[in-house]
Image (cartoon, rainbow, N blue to C red):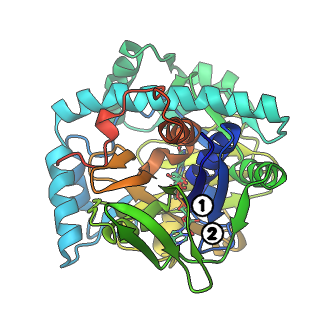
Amino acid sequence: MNKNVIVIGGGIIGLCSAYYLQKEGHHVTIIDQSNMDAGASYVNAGFLSPSHIIPLSAPGVMRKGLKWMFDPTSPLYIKPRLDSDFLKWTYAFNKSCNPNHVKNAIPAIKSLAVLSQELYKDIREKEHFSSQYQKDGILMLFQTEKMLHEELKHARLATEEGLEVNEVTLTDLKQLEPNVNLNVLGGMYYKCDAHTTPNEFMTEMKAYLKTNGVVFYPNEKVEDLEVKNKKIVALVTKAHKLTADEFVLAAGSWSATLSKKLGIHLLLEAGKGYRIDTTRSTGIKLPAILVESKVAVTPMHGFTRFAGTMEIAGINDTINKSRVNAIANAVTKYYPEISVTDTEKDAAASGLRPVSPDGLAYIGTSSKCSNLIIAAGHAMLGWSMATGTGKLVSELISEKKPSLELKMFSPDRKF
Ligand SMILES: Cc1cc2nc3c(=O)[nH]c(=O)nc-3n(C[C@H](O)[C@H](O)[C@H](O)COP(=O)(O)OP(=O)(O)OC[C@H]3O[C@@H](n4cnc5c(N)ncnc54)[C@H](O)[C@@H]3O)c2cc1C
């Protein structure tokens, strides 16, 4: 049966949900409080990375977060707040930082990332998109023995999961990156990963959806959700009151504010990150992660992007110059001949990753509302997992068997 579906949020998760819903023959509307041209889905590093199988909440991360709290240049910053949602999130995050959770989460994370990577390719081919999709792999570049050991452990786990990864020597790196000098001890090469230019894919996807009948309401904030008998009966903005059979909550970092109106208490924090772009030629051929600094480097169509930092400090888009400088300094530390200019730093942009406390997204229904699918909380992997998430959302609404087991992603899971 074809349904009327409203998707709240037109970031990558909302657009991919709309794509698969429209393909199933549903009538889809997307509503977004912004002009749909900025934020996490535009500033991200563009990695489609099944290699990132370890959730953010891993052993030792909380300790690192506490240590880094007083360092203005640290890649992870958790700003303490006297707010019950934040305290509950921190408690759940700390509880998830254990080996058992990591072991259980890895297969779920990997399956969704692998499925999504295949679906990106599939969409591009089917819809004749010309946006960048290159499966050249990514390099994990490290400068210290300590990180070499950490990376060897990650690589072993990835290999056990069937992902293709090799340790590379400095000689190998010279061949892989012939046009740049690298100041590193060595690297791991994850051939399983791909990279994209986010702005290109977002633009092509929005154009595809518009051409194929999806209705857009940009610059309209969902202020309220009216509920009767555990069902949303209307969505309210300043200008409209809209009804539908089903709703999808894909409002990224803002999802918890909206879900609260339905009595659903999602634990979700915004994790701010920044990107710096340079259109000058860098000579960088392969995407990389500068491991100690946690900076991502992506050769995109027409420019190179440097992205990083995770600031858990509430919902705001202020730019912290110290952290932008830290990203720029990391670039020169690993690529000594490349430096970021002041103009490029001044043009840095930010985005908010929607971060759940256990590193797993919320995908599915809640017992508190029967006509809502939640699709939020993908943190550092929202780009990598968007197409798979969109397909799952559409399968749930179309009452089809989901492509993946969804238990670990349940919005009602207990922490
Ligand atoms: C610097 C950086 C680098 C990253 N790199 C990668 C990467 O390489 N690979 C990867 O997989 N992931 C990466 N990520 C993460 C990824 O970008 C995010 O997980 C993803 O974009 C989240 O998408 P989303 O659609 O859930 O949220 P968003 O893109 O934030 O979209 C949510 C939308 O909901 C709208 N909205 C919110 N509230 C309302 C309301 N009340 N009414 C109407 N609309 C509303 C917002 O305006 C917004 O447009 C990175 C993120 C950052 C910041």
* Crowding at mark 1 (Cα within 10 Å: few <14, some 14-19, many 20+): many
Query: Looking at the image, which residue sits at the far bottom?
Result: 238
Quadrant of the rendered structure where residue 270 is? bottom left
Give how far across and how far down residue 354 sits, in percent. Answer: 42, 58
On screen, residue 209 above or below 24: below
Q: Nearer the viewer, residue 82 or 67?
A: 82
- Please give left or right for residue 357 compared with residue 354 in the image: left
Percent position of residue 29, x then y: 65, 60
SS of the residue under disc 2: loop
Residue 209 versus residue 72: which sits nearer the camera? 209
Whether the residue carrying mark 1 lies under 8 Å from ligand 1 is answered with yes
**Quarter where residue 214 is shown:** bottom right
Residue kind at label 2, given as amino acid type: Ala
Q: Which mark is residue 348?
A: 2
Q: Earlier in the sequence, mark 2 or mark 1?
A: 1
As drawn, the label of residue 275 is: 1
**Image quadrant where one finds the N terminus:** top right
**Residue 6 appears left or right of 25:** left
SS class of the residue under badge 1?
strand
> For the residue marked with disc 1, what is the amino acid?
Arg
Distance between the Cα atoms at labels 2 and 1?
6 Å
The reply to whether dot 2 and dot 1 touch (C-beta < 8 Å) is yes
Q: Residue at 77% of width from left, 39% of height from top?
A: 132
Question: Which residue is at a point 63% across and 69% down the rendered structure image?
Answer: 348
